[in-house]
Amino acid sequence: MLAPVILMRYLLLCLPLFLFLSACGAHHETSPGIAARVGGRAITEAELRAYTRYAATFDSVVYPDSAEATCVRSPARQACATFKAGVLGRLIQERTVLNYAALHHIRLSAADNLAAQTQIRHLTATSAPTSRLFRLGISRRFVTQVVRRQLLVQRVEERVAGTRARRGPESRIRKIGIPISGNTSRDNRRLMQVAATGKVPADAAERTLWMAPFKMKPDVRRALSAARPGEYVGPFSRPGYLLLIQLLERGTHRYSAAAHAIITSKLFSAWLARAVAAAGPRCADAAGRMTPCSRRIMKVA
């Protein structure tokens, strides 16, 4: 039951981190019972309490030793105030995504609805650790809503990423790792010999593969970007060996499922940062006045 546990953990908490908002503006309005406004829509205090309680209860069940787990019993603690602020930040992100979905008529498909039902069955199964949630006051209806929202977020991710996450540039490279001998001059001569002849020493490791630029280390990516097919780049210092890379060819290919997920996440994270900033969310301060949300809220999201 590990997969449902991981899924449940991130249903609310999976949106990208480290977004920053402007703190300028002088107009304040009071909105009783409203925690924040995003794109003209409100996040109520009741909604914030419900999601905070859900997240804290989940941690108390699955991660009982975590600091957040204690927020079920002691919500007034400073750590729990920070936890609640993070939940608000995530709700702001989520509301921004849902507003986009509504504007672009993105809805759950029949397959999505079936997937949601399957996830709920896994989460409520007697053998699942998460089944305790429903004995601690978290309703099946509420969790169903969370599951469906997260599936809709995934649909938006796919729309935002588009074809850029499905196909892209890759380089076919030959990676040659030569063990460091401790004699710099000898190592340099061996590297020069490989680059001149293409022959690999008996104690060296060699591998040929296609690799997308985003999977490469920055130093390799920069060097290969200026190379022509047939040329060697490097050496790159790695623990215990020197890495020499030969560029064989370039091409455009369909990415694997794992690569697709990585690219989608990166593209969506960048898009969400811009979308939240453009939405200009406003949060209630201690006096109930609506002001631009503080950077602290989004930093802990």
Image: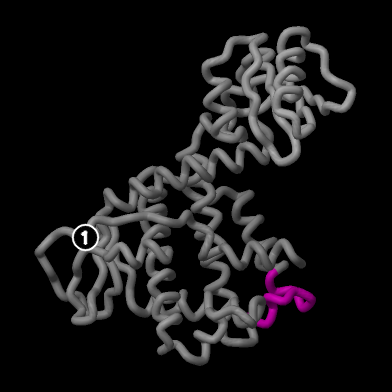
The quarter of the image holding the C terminus is bottom left
Q: Quadrant of residue 238 in the image?
A: top right
Question: Which residue shows up at 19% across the image and 81% down it?
Answer: 287
Q: Is residue 75 left or right of residue 177?
A: left
Q: Is residue 136 left or right of residue 200?
A: left
Residue on which disc 1 sits: 23
- For the residue marked with disc 1, what is the amino acid? Ala
The answer to if 127 sits in the magenta stretch is yes
The quarter of the image holding the N terminus is bottom right
Secondary structure character of the magenta stretch overall: helix
**172, 86: nearer the viewer:** 172
The residues colored magenta run 123-133
Q: Quadrant of residue 91 in the image?
A: bottom left
Residue 2, image x and y in percent? 74, 65
**181, 27: nearer the viewer:** 181
Question: Which residue shows up at 44% across the image and 87% down it?
Answer: 75
Q: How many marks?
A: 1
| 125 w.r.t. 189: above or below | below
Colour mode of the rendering:
one colour
| 272 w.r.t. 65: above or below | above
Residue 197, image x and y in percent? 77, 8
Residue 65, image x and y in percent? 63, 82
